């Protein structure tokens, strides 16, 4: 039976990497019926609609799974981030971002294999912002809840247990943010006690940034609040080949939205330059979420082959291929593994 999936191509490089990903997914042998939602973000606002139309939310609610390209958010003004709204409205509380070294890439670090679990609905992204015109004072409130913190921490430990991971590191700034980060850290210690088989440690976020670029191999699962997770996942991307290769999944109780860590990359949009690997790896996570394990394994095998060979990579990794050629070659390899 075909899986019904909401497909949001997004803008910037979104439509290019989404098309490439669909091509590769269709080579896995798994069957899909795509519910295309093309008009979101600026395109929707220009047409007189909401940045995130209710119909898009409804489509994801009814299909339970979406594959999504990046959507541009105006900086410092304009509409609220479609990406943040989607995560909040669907209560996609867990943002999972694996950063694993790929074969054949000449990166500063080898054998990196970490997973970042970012709380996805609270913290500084709560949308609690105000500006006091008279005094020239701006506030952005980092509100977190006990239940929201506990569920992402537990999600991380459960994932670690299920997948045989050895260690969890909680990242915080509890020395300064005593109430918010302090609570997150305390809850992490409490939850950790229920998982005696998993090594547990904590790091202050600034030190963690340094640790990650000096000895990234020493970290396994990392769980943290929204802003720290956002920053650390781009940092982790830099360790293993850049934003073009890092996948992500936004997971809630009822729905899941699979999207790359990177944004809409307006500097290279529409030029067939984007690396679709990040979204393709998100699609691999989606296949596993759908229990399409054989299809996921075929996709993975094809991708590892292309990277090990190193001849058909995209420009961001020093290769000669555009988005389309890369995905065509990858689709051929994937089909050969089905
Ligand atoms: P970005 O991730 O779009 O780009 C940062 C740099 O990485 C650029 O030089 C870009 O060319 C490069 N890059 C990104 N993805 C690439 C890929 N697949 N292949 C090759 N190179 C790639 O981040 P930036 O510039 O900060 O954000 C641009 C827009 O994207 C903003 O409006 C931002 O709000 C939005 N954004 C959306 C996200 C989402 O939809 N989930 C996530 C992050 C940002
Ligand atoms: Mg980000």
Image: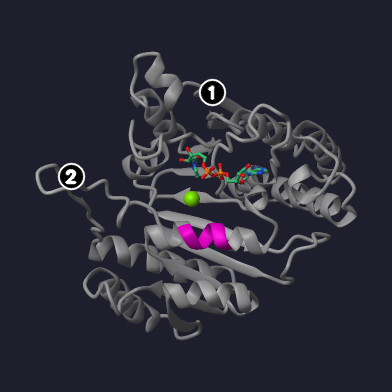
The x, y position of residue 167, in whole percent, is 53, 79
Q: Nearer the viewer, mark 2 or mark 1?
A: 2
Q: Which residue is mark 1?
A: 36
Q: Which residue is located at x 71 percent, y 42 percent? A: 275
The x, y position of residue 274, in whole percent, is 69, 38
Q: Residue 153 falls in which quadrant of the image? A: bottom left
* Mark 2 to mark 1 CA distance (whole Å): 38 Å
Q: Which residue is mark 2?
A: 131
Q: Which residue is located at x 47 percent, y 62 percent? A: 117
Seen in the picture, residue 152 relative to 48 is either above or below; the reply is below
> Mark 2 falls on what kind of element?
strand
Tell me which segment is drawn in magenta: 231-235
Seen in the picture, residue 159 relative to 295 is either above or below; the reply is below
Q: Quadrant of the N terminus?
A: top right
Q: Is residue 51 magenta?
A: no
Q: Residue 238 falls in which quadrant of the image? A: bottom right
Respond yes or no on whether mark 2 lies under 8 Å from ligand 1: no
> Mark 1 falls on what kind of element?
strand
The crowding category of the residue bearing disc 2, from other C-alpha atoms within 10 Å (few below 14, some 14 to 19, many at least 20), is few
Drawn side of residue 324 relative to residue 284, left or right: right
Q: Is residue 161 visible?
A: no
The x, y position of residue 147, in whole percent, is 26, 63
Q: Which numbered dot is residue 128?
A: none
């Amino acid at each position: 039976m075909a899986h019904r999936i909401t497909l949001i191509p997004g803008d910037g490089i979104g439509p290019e990497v989404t098309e490439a990903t669909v091509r590769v997914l269709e080579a896995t042998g798994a069957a899909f019926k795509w519910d295309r939602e093309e008009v979101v973000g600026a395109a929707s606002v220009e047409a007189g609609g909401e940045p995130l139309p209710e119909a898009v939310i409804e489509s994801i609610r009814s299909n339970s799974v979406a594959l999504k390209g990046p959507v541009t958010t105006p900086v410092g003004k304009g509409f609220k981030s479609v990406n943040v709204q989607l995560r909040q409205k669907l209560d996609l509380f867990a943002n999972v971002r694996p950063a694993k070294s790929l074969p054949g890439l000449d990166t500063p670090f080898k054998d990196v294999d970490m997973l970042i679990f970012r709380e996805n609905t609270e913290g500084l992204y709560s949308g609690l912002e105000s500006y006091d015109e008279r005094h020239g004072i701006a506030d952005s409130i980092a509100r977190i809840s006990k239940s929201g913190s506990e569920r992402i921490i537990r999600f991380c430990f459960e994932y670690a247990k299920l997948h045989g991971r050895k260690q969890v590191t909680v990242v915080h700034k509890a020395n300064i943010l005593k109430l918010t980060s302090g609570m997150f850290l305390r809850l992490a210690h409490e939850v950790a006690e229920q998982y005696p088989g998993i090594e547990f440690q904590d790091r202050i976020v600034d030190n963690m940034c340094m640790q990650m670029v000096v000895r990234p191999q020493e970290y396994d699962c990392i769980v943290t609040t929204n802003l720290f997770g956002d920053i650390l996942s781009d940092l982790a991307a830099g360790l293993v080949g850049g934003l073009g290769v890092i996948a992500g999944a936004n997971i809630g109780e009822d729905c899941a939205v699979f999207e790359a860590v990177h944004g809409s990359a307006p500097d290279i949009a529409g030029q067939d330059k984007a690396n679709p690997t990040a979204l393709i790896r998100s699609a691999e996570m989606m296949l596993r979420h759908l229990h399409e394990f054989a299809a996921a394994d075929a996709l993975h095998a094809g991708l590892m082959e292309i990277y090990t060979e190193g001849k058909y990579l995209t420009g961001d990794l020093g290769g000669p291929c555009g988005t389309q050629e890369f995905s065509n070659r990858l689709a051929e390899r994937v089909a050969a593994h089905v």
